[in-house]
Image (tube, grey):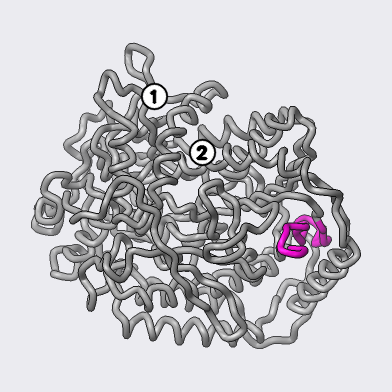
Amino acid sequence: MVMEVFDYDLIVLGSGLGGLTSAIHASLASKGKLKIAIVTKLHAMRSHSVSAEGGISGVLYPESNKDTKELHAYDTVKGSDYLADQDAVEQLVEMAPGEIRFYDHIGVAWNRDDSGHIQQRPFGGMSIPRTAFAADKTGFFMMRALYDEVTGFENIDVFHEHFATRLFLDGGRFSGIFAIDLATRNSRLFRGKACVIATGGFSRTYGFTTTAHSSTGDGIALAYRAGLPLKDMEFVQFHPTALVPSGILITEAARGEGGYLRNNKNERFMEKYAKSKMELAPRDIVSRAIVTEIREGRGFVHEESGLRYVHLDLTHLDSKLLDERLPMIREIAIKMLNIDPHKEPLPIRPAAHFTMGGIHTNINGQVMASAEGGIAGGLWAVGECGCVSVHGSNRLGSNSLSQCSVWGRIAGTSIPDYVSAVPEMTGRKTLDEMAEQEESRINDILERKGTVNPYELQSRLQSTMDELVYVYRRTDSLQKALATVKELQRKYSDIYVSDKGRVFNTNLRDALQVENLLDLAEVVIEGALRRKESRGAHAMEEYPERDDANWLKHTIAFKEDDGVKIEYIPVKITRWKPEKRVY
């Protein structure tokens, strides 16, 4: 491989909502003076953010609907099962309305009412409809507007289809990243003063998931292997309504617009689990309700896959409403299952969807170098890959797009001052040597005469996580899952890559992604095993109650040679003391 070297002030790793927002605001704050590289393993417009369907939360019209930022914050804290850092939540709700208006200014086609106001729909766990939307393709419209903006900046270069394999630190401060140009397999070293990690989540540790095949937690794994801490990784959100058997997301907006969940007795069973909210209870509660109905024999069985499911019923909704507000859901159902949701209910079950945990950051999105100590200079993590923590143990739907936008802006606007205060890069010889070592590591993997197919490792990992680290968890199941993951990690050292070609060697990329998935799955399971309570998305059958006396704290994980080191830090509580979570 040929190694090329590029020098930038700021490197943005990832091109979803968080990454593009960071790049835009860094450029605006520097008046176009920063030299910025966006490095993404996909074409930027293929980032998983385009798949966000339902909308973005924010208090837009408090006078007309009697909404308040305080109520949005309370809903978020309660929805998090009181694990969210409340100072971060207050920052989210304060800035979110401005972000929705920013997207309005750059051309997002929001649904509007007859008076011209942006419409807002109900979402799970929200007291008042506060989710702005663009039909059921909100993420796509937001991404299109952002990408159009990015292409207008002469100081921003986009490196599409570049897969990053290593993050470099020099004296605890960011110095560069190593990436493979997938089109040529040439190595590229990006040297820089600052970096925003915005690579999304890692739900592809599971097989049944709503997320793209690209959601392999690359940036989180790079930070972890660079010695940086991860936070609250045991909390994986399962979206209640994924289409069976594909796992394709059926947006929460389908329930927000009035959809019902029904079991095989045609009962609207959510009355038993969340009488006041019904289908619009938070996602962890709805997912547990669906799994309970299935376990107790009130579900259906998909003949080909064997997956058990319940029904999402939209047949009673006005056909005009369905076609105007959920057009993509109807299209997906017809194309994938030949089911018209006007006429028949949809088969759904919970699927891995969002990862509340990620790289440990402070309230400004700066990556932490230790559990409670200093920061890693020049590093920010935004969006799903960064744990600020605003979602705690369970995210409310539509808060994720707000999170990406808010902390993308916070990071971007603060970076020019940091860059101007940092002296010119030193230690370039050491950095070049580390890049050469990484290049040799990649070559070794490519040329290895192994006996293990990496796709078999990934398949076994995903089936293990689906079966043993799902909505309900048990200690013995988690121990079995951990033993399997450690076995797969050992086998990884004997993998082979069949494709030796240079042009778009997806076999090599996929093999490297498997390593990321294995590392992150281990952290998820280790954190889950230690947390002896049920909170949000972490439901332990032996410990069915939340235990604030012992577990009102964040899990912090570090990589060590022999596994995962776990520490804990307190949750930041500003206004809302933990109380019983009833809906």
Q: Which residue is mark 1?
A: 111
Mark 1 or 2, nearer chain start: 1
Q: Position of residue 346 (x, y in %)?
A: 26, 50
Residue 224 is one of the magenta-drawn residues = no
Counting other residues with Cα less than 10 Å from the Cα at mark 1, is it few (<14), some (14-19), or many (20 or more)? Answer: some
What is the three-letter code of the residue carrying label 2? Val
Identify the residue at the far top of this view.
115
Counting other residues with Cα less than 10 Å from the Cα at mark 2, is it few (<14), some (14-19), or many (20 or more)? Answer: many
Q: Which residues are magenta?
A: 169-189
Tell me which secondary structure the magenta stretch mostly adopts.
strand
Of residues 517 and 569, the one nearer the viewer is 569
Q: Position of residue 510 (x, y in %)?
A: 63, 67
Q: Which residue is mark 2?
A: 406
Q: Are marks 1 and 2 in contact (CB under 8 Å)?
A: no
Does dot 1 land on a helix, a strand or a loop? loop
Q: Tell me, for residue 532, which label it has, or none.
A: none
Horizontal side of residue 343 vs 363, given as left or right: left
Q: Position of residue 84 (x, y in %)?
A: 38, 53
Q: Taking 533 as reference, is 319 above or below it?
A: above
Horizontal side of residue 387 vs 46, given as left or right: left
Residue 495 appears in the figure: yes
Which numbered mark, 1 or 2, is in the foreground of this view? Answer: 2
Horizontal side of residue 251 vs 512, given as left or right: left
Q: Position of residue 74 (x, y in %)?
A: 29, 42
Of residues 263 and 334, the one nearer the viewer is 263
Residue 174 is one of the magenta-drawn residues = yes
Q: Residue at x 31, y 55 (%)?
A: 82
Quadrant housing the N terminus = bottom right
Q: Residue at x 69, y 86 (%)?
A: 450
